[in-house]
Image (cartoon, grey):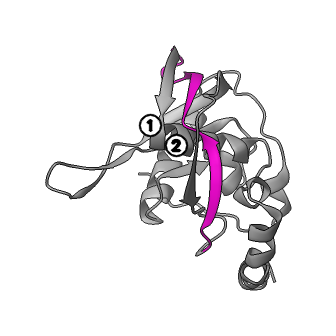
């Protein structure tokens, strides 16, 4: 039975550490993925990296989102991404508001490539290569950033970061007194 994990929040040092490659898909890695999915769903997230739950392994969970023909917001099934390598970012960029489970309540404008090429393993250990675009590309780049110790506040303008300072201080006081 999957369990909900603790999500580490700004300014915990684990969020600035670099994750290590997963050498083998073990039962422990499968259990971690299941627990991360449970945690992401309970927090109503669309992505979660292992570093956010204090595990320095190159694994994250994403799920796509879209609005269907009737205008209803939809979330896709969770996908497990292991040992991702991102390449060939599109020249076309998109700026959108991003939130983060490690920065609760904070939403910042982040410019990212509209598309990216991703090579990764699934839970069966199979290597997959595909082009991700739009929201799927954005959430993948966001979660991959976490595995490299990068937060959305590092991807914003200095003025946007300055405006976020009071909120960051409040998160720090509440979650890491």
| Magenta residues (range) | 106-127
Decide if residue 176 is on the left or right side of residue 80: right
Q: In this view, does 106 lie above or below 18?
A: below
- The question of residue 97 being in magenta is answered with no
Q: Residue at horizontal 21%, vertical 49%?
A: 68
Where, by quadrant of the figure, is residue 119 drawn? top right
Q: Is residue 91 above or below residue 1?
A: above
Q: Residue at horizontal 49%, vertical 43%?
A: 62
Q: SS class of the residue under badge 2? A: strand
Q: Where is residue 137 in the image (x, y as percent from the top left)?
A: 53, 37
| Closer to the camera in the image, 167 or 111 | 111
Q: Quadrant of the C terminus?
A: bottom right
Report whether residue 5 is seen.
yes
* Residue linked to disc 2: 61
Q: Where is residue 112 in the image (x, y as percent from the top left)?
A: 63, 43
Q: Position of residue 132 (x, y in %)?
A: 49, 29
Disc on res. 70: none
| Closer to the camera in the image, 145 or 48 | 145
Magenta span dominant secondary structure: strand
Where, by quadrant of the figure, is residue 174 drawn? bottom right
* Residue linked to disc 1: 79
């Amino acid at each position: 039975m999957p369990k909900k994990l603790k999500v580490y929040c700004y300014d915990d040092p684990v969020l600035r550490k670099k994750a290590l490659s997963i050498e083998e898909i073990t039962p422990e890695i499968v259990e971690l993925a299941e627990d991360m999915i449970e945690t992401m769903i309970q927090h109503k997230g669309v992505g979660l990296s292992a570093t956010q739950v204090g595990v320095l392994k190159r694994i994250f969970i994403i799920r796509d989102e879209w609005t269907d023909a009737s205008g209803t917001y939809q979330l896709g099934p969770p996908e497990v991404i292991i040992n991702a390598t991102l390449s060939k970012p599109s020249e076309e960029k998109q700026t959108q508001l991003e939130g983060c489970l490690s920065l609760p309540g904070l939403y910042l404008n982040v410019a990212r490539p509209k598309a990216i090429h991703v090579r990764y393993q699934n839970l069966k250990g199979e290597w997959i290569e595909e082009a991700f675009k739009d929201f799927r590309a954005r959430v993948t780049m966001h979660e991959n950033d976490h595995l490299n110790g990068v937060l959305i506040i590092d991807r914003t303008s200095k003025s946007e970061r300055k405006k976020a300072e009071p909120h960051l201080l409040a998160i720090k006081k509440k979650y890491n007194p």
